[in-house]
Image (cartoon, coloured by chain):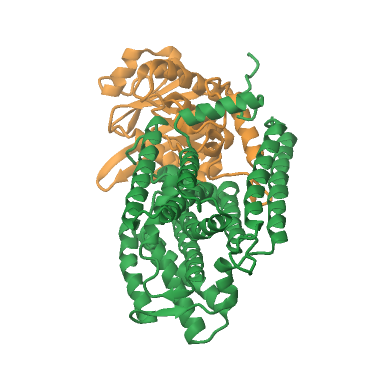
Chain colours: A orange, B green
Amino acid sequence: MGTPLIELTNVTKNFGPVDVLKGVNFTVEEGKVTALVGDNGAGKSTLIKGLSGVQPFDGGTVTFRGEEVHVRSPRQASAMGIEVVYQDLALCENLDIVQNMFLGREEKFGGTLDEAAMEFAAQKALQSLSVRTVKSVRQKVSSLSGGQRQTVAIARSVLRNAKMVILDEPTAALGVAQTEQVLNLVRRLADNGIAVLIISHNLADVFEVADNVNVLYLGQMVAHLKVKNTNRDEVVAYITGSKSMTGVA
Amino acid sequence: MSAPTPISTGHEGTVRDQFRSYIQRVRGGDMGSLPAILALIVLAALFASLSPYFLTTGNIANLFVQASELTVLACALVFVLLLAEIDLSAGVTAGSGMAVFQVLFGVLGWNWLVALLLALVAGALIGSFIGFFVSRIGVPSFVVTLGLFLGLQGFMLLLLGDGGIYRLEQPELKAIMNSNMPVWAGWAMLAVAVIGSFAFGVSDRRRRTKVGLPTRPFIMLIFKVAAIAILGGLVVLLLSVNRGQAMLAIEGVPIVIPIVLVILVVGTFVLDRTVFGRYIYAVGGNPEAARRAGIKVAQIRLYAFIICSTLAVVSGLLHASRIGSIESTAGRSIVLEGVAAAVVGGVSLFGGRGRLAYAAIGALVISIIDNGLGLIGLPAGANFLITGGVLVAAATIDALSRRRSGVSIIRT
């Protein structure tokens, strides 16, 4: 059992008259891959946006390492160590891997860019994740495949000393081999002690990589399951609402 | 666990490996200003064979002086082109800056240095005006600067009067384009360039070694510095020969050359080695990614337009110095040549790709066409047709190389 890094209790969010999150309880543990699944409109995106400070929650409590916090902005979330890797990757294709990994947080040396230090750190970060698919850290991102780009985006969060990495549909646009690479990377991220939250529609991916599965259904968390204790049919039943609230831990 | 495999940094391997990976990059569509350099060589050979005057020292000096004005304007435009923006008003901004100078210096009788400084400030104000509308309001730069292109022509007419042409009398300013440095100063300039580039190269290598990174073969740095020494030495040598026709000796490197070189070096330093420069490339490559990385996109855009307009005034000064007068109609057509120079040199219109050196090479190409066609006596019409053709060819190469490097043409 990992220690909970972040714990949501009775969290709510509404947009005008629409209650999108109706009292959600949810924990993400260090060194574990936690999957968040649910049908379209279940509130997955709203939950991530609350965690990353883009759209703060309306009610409920969030504790981070046991202390209550109020995440009000992406900058604050980032300072706490929460990094989001978006589905449409936030990379500049005209820049190389090192430049992208340090974008917005460049190392400086006497007022100018410290390319050597950044190159070294980027190389180490990629190596710590056992990335073998990238040829050179000075390759332009435009020359990389979708899987390699996803790798760079994930490695960037490691460079930033993330304690929790949120991955939004990381394999949505990838082929079979590249999906495998990215899932391996996700696993290594957790093995390095980082709390990983993965949002996916692809249950095959979830069962391959995740330790815990949480199912959102119409703004409520209807299931917290351990991957080894459940199966695909059960998860689908929760997602579609044909099974509810039983077995909630 | 297996041992981590080292990921290369592009600095490993022999000269041969380095050369091979360069060829690979070029074939992948990352050509830089290679097409422009080839065009430069072909054009120079063509004009040299067609006109006996083309390779005379007098004409070579002339060519560099003519190109300097366009080089500075093209460099100014690079800052906004890198953001995938455009400044159609850069030429008339140059003219307006000099009109402000004329009023302060010629009419009000202020000190010429103060007047010049305020002319540059006027440029910066025009740039912040454009930057405000583009970055804060969201008006396309094409439209804002088209409006200013018209508006500033009116501004110049109001300041200088209809058909206003004023002589530029200040000897220091006239000297920029019309006088030469002593011969020794040309060689000193070259020495500074050679020693400077070597020192930069060595300090970069030291920094990499200190951190524990591989460095390129030392011989490559020697090659690079030797190339600067030989090419630069050739130019300085040609310009040091007396090119005067009569009794009066005309020799030495024109004063404008070191001015342009300083702009190129400082500008390149800012773009390559500062955080601001990095952010310009990032915003030009993917504004949304830049924003998510915490870059203040609007602020970067604003500064880029300010730099562009201020540098444009410098090119206006060079123009006024060359023709010896300040006119109310200055700068109407040169902006298109400036954009052409940048694009011909390899600066992408799609943003995010290009360097100041590319703009300088492009400016040389445009100037050599102008100069050479003038020498072989083709009508002005042919000049426009050929320059236009070269521009379309360059833009085509830009678009094709983008496609090849796998970047989609559609901007999101």
Q: Residue at x 64, y 30 (%)?
A: B11
Image quadrant holding the N terminus of chain B, namely: top right
Q: Is residue B56 above or below residue B168?
A: above
Q: Can the viewer see residue B357?
A: yes
- Counting from the top left corner in percent of width and height, residue A75 is at 50, 47
Count the labels in the image.
0
Q: Is residue A211 above or below residue B377?
A: above
| Residue situated in front as seen by the camera: A173 or B412 | B412
Q: Residue at x 42, y 42 (%)?
A: B286
Residue B152 appears left or right of A226: left
| Residue situated in front as seen by the camera: B15 or B249 | B249
- Counting from the top left corner in percent of width and height, residue B397 is at 39, 38
Q: Is residue A239 above or below residue A163?
A: above
Q: Residue at x 31, y 62 (%)?
A: B146
Q: Can the viewer see residue A194?
A: no
| Residue situated in front as seen by the camera: B36 or B143 | B36
Image quadrant holding the C terminus of chain B, namely: top left
- Counting from the top left corner in percent of width and height, residue B240 is at 66, 57
